[in-house]
Image (spheres, coloured by chain):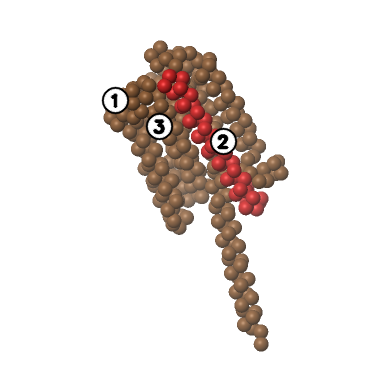
Chain colours: A red, B brown
Amino acid sequence: MSDWAYILLGWSVTGGAVTLYALRVVVRGRILSRAVPEDRRRWTS
Amino acid sequence: MTTLTASSTGSRGSRILGVLALVGAAWLVILALAISPADQTQGELVRLMYVHVPSAWTAYLAFALTAVGSAMYLWKRSQWWDLVAASSAEIGVLFCGLALLTGMIWGRPTWGSYWEWGDARLVTTLVLFLMFVGYLAVRRVPADPHLRSRRSAFVGILAAVDIPVVHYSVKWWRTLHQQATVLSTDFDPKIDDLMLFTLVFGMGVFTLTFLWLLVHRFRIAWLEEQVDEVALADAIRERRSEATETALAGAEP
């Protein structure tokens, strides 16, 4: 493997993992938000 | 504002943070992969440092915040601090895992192997990662919520003791891993100005990303607690109405 292949692998792993985790957090937040009355979500007020 | 955030964990502040992190990430890619020069000894592979070092920095930051949150929970007995500690630990595990992975990817072409068991920095970082995976596992053990929070607070503080050990491992045990570049004690980084700028900029972008993730992860943890409370309140209300119906039926002649 060339140096650039290692570089792109490292960057892809990092970008991919952070993006997947961020998506998981956003989706879970949306699902849970629907299950909780708005007055219990302090950041909406 | 309320309509925008009605079914999400977002708010105006978190959106600003998210946009800043995204714009910063785009600039980091350009700086690190195109503008910043190759290193005299590492060559092009130095470009892996711009994700490896910020990942390690973010893991330190997240685990330190877990320790602070844990200590504050033990002092104040506040659920808020307990949830901050838990949310920060989860994100810390993500970034610590990334620091290990990107380090391994860098190690293969540089040292000739993905992993060196004799290297103090690698082993102490792995121990740090495993201790915080243990912290998350302790949080999942079924128990009274206060007992669970107290137990995990002790684990969080104990695990964070490894942070300075990881950081100073390259000084205490002179093994394979290079010395600290940015976070060195003499505050005199010996690298090219543009490379240093890219590295520090990367740490800033990762810190913004961490804060964005923390805000959202904390709100999820908060919502999970609320879901449990709402479910408990509903169950109590149902039981009461059942009991009232039974009592009324028994009272009828």
Q: Secondary structure at mark 2?
A: helix
Q: Secondary structure at mark 3?
A: helix
Residue B155 place in picture, x, y as percent: 39, 46
Residue B183 place in picture, x, y as percent: 41, 24
- Per the rendering, the mark at residue B212 is 2
Q: Is residue A1 visible?
A: yes
Disc 1 to disc 2: CB gap under 8 Å: no
Q: Say which of B204 and B51 sits in front.
A: B51
- Image quadrant holding the N terminus of chain B, namely top right
Residue B66 place in picture, x, y as percent: 45, 41
Tell me the kind of residue under disc 2: Trp
Which label lies toward us, 1 or 3? 3
- Per the rendering, the mark at residue A27 is none
**Disc on the earlier residue, 1 or 2:** 1
> How much space separates mark 1 and mark 3, taking CA atoms?
17 Å
Q: Residue at x 42, y 15 (%)?
A: B43
Q: Say which of B14 and A25 sits in front.
A: A25
The residue carrying mark 3 is B100
Q: Say which of B157 and B130 sits in front.
A: B130
> How much space separates mark 2 and mark 3, taking CA atoms?
22 Å
Q: Secondary structure at mark 1?
A: loop
Disc 2 to disc 3: CB gap under 8 Å: no
The residue carrying mark 1 is B175
Tell me the kind of residue under disc 3: Leu
